[in-house]
Image (tube, rainbow, N blue to C red):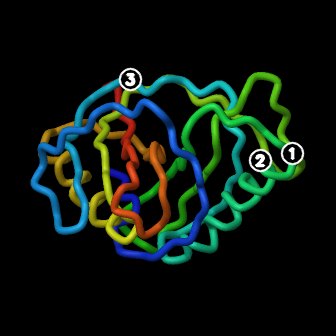
Amino acid sequence: MPCPRSHPRALWLTIGLAVAGLPTLTVEAEPAPGFHLSEPIEKQMAPVQRLLHGRAEATFADFPIALGQAFGPVNRAIAEHGIQTTGPAIFIYEGTTSDPQAPFTLTTGFPTAEGTEAPAGLALRTLPAVRVVSAYYTGSLRDIGEAWRIFNEQVADAGYPTGGTAYELYLYWEGDDSDNNVVELQLTLNDG
C-alpha cells in the first residue's frame, strides 16, 4: 500500500488558490493535536480533462527539491501566460512505499480551461474517473505526514483494497503554516 509522506517534513510552496463552495467537513476521527482528519469514505473521483502539470522523480527524503522541479514551472506558467485554472492543485504520487528513500513519480498541476495549451516543459494530461478512498485533512503542512500515516492505518483497518496511486487535492489554501488549509487525501482502489 502506498504510504505517502510517512515522515515529517517542511515544504515551501505557493498555491494561492481557494475554491468557493467547499463541502461542510465533519470530523469523525480522533484528531491528533494541530489537525483534523475525517473518517475515510469510498467515492468516485471525477475525471479531469486538462491537467496542466509538471513531473519529477522523487523520494520523500528529497521531496522539497522534487516539488520545486514539478510545481514551480506550473505556477510560473500560469502567472506568465495567464492560464485559467478551473479547480484545485492536484498532487499525484505514483509508486510510493513506506521507505523514504524509495523513488516514486510526483506529478503536480491544476485543471485548466478548455483550449489551454501546455507551455514548453509542461504537459496536459487527462485523469480518468477512478474509485478512491478519501479523507479530508485540515491543518498545516507540518502535520500532513502524520495525517497520511493515520489515514493509511484507517484504510488498512477497514480492509479497503488500495492500488498504487495517491492523490492530494488542495481544496483551500492559506499558506504552509495555516491550520485552515483543507486537503483531500485519496488512495485509488483496486477493482478486484
Task: Depth check: give the residue in front, 1 or 133.
Answer: 133
Q: In this view, does 116 lie to the left or right of 43?
A: right
- Residue 44 is labelled as 3
The image position of residue 148, as x and y in percent, is 31, 57
User: Can you say whether 100 is above or below 147 in the image?
Assistant: below
Provide residue 102's location: percent of width, then percent of height: 48, 69
Distance Cα–Cα, label 1 vs label 3: 32 Å
Residue type at mark 1 is His
Residue type for callout 3: Gln
Mark on residue 78? 2
Nearer the camera: disc 2 or disc 3: 2
Q: Work out whether 153 lies above or below 11.
A: above
Q: Nearer the viewer, residue 28 or 1?
A: 28
* Furthest residue toward right: 120
Residue contact at pointers 2 and 1, CB within 8 angstroms:
yes
Residue 64 image position (x, y, % from top left): 57, 72
Q: What element carries label 3?
A: strand
Q: Which mark is residue 81?
A: 1
Can you give x and y, in whole percent of width and height, for residue 87 in the image?
Answer: 58, 35
Quadrant including the C terminus:
top left
Circle nearer the N terminus (2, 3): 3
The image quarter containing residue 96 is bottom left
Left/right of residue 93 with respect to residue 179 in the rendered view: right
Q: Which of marks 1 and 3 is in front?
A: 1
**Given contact means CB atoms under 8 Å apart, are the residues at marks 2 and 3 in contact?**
no
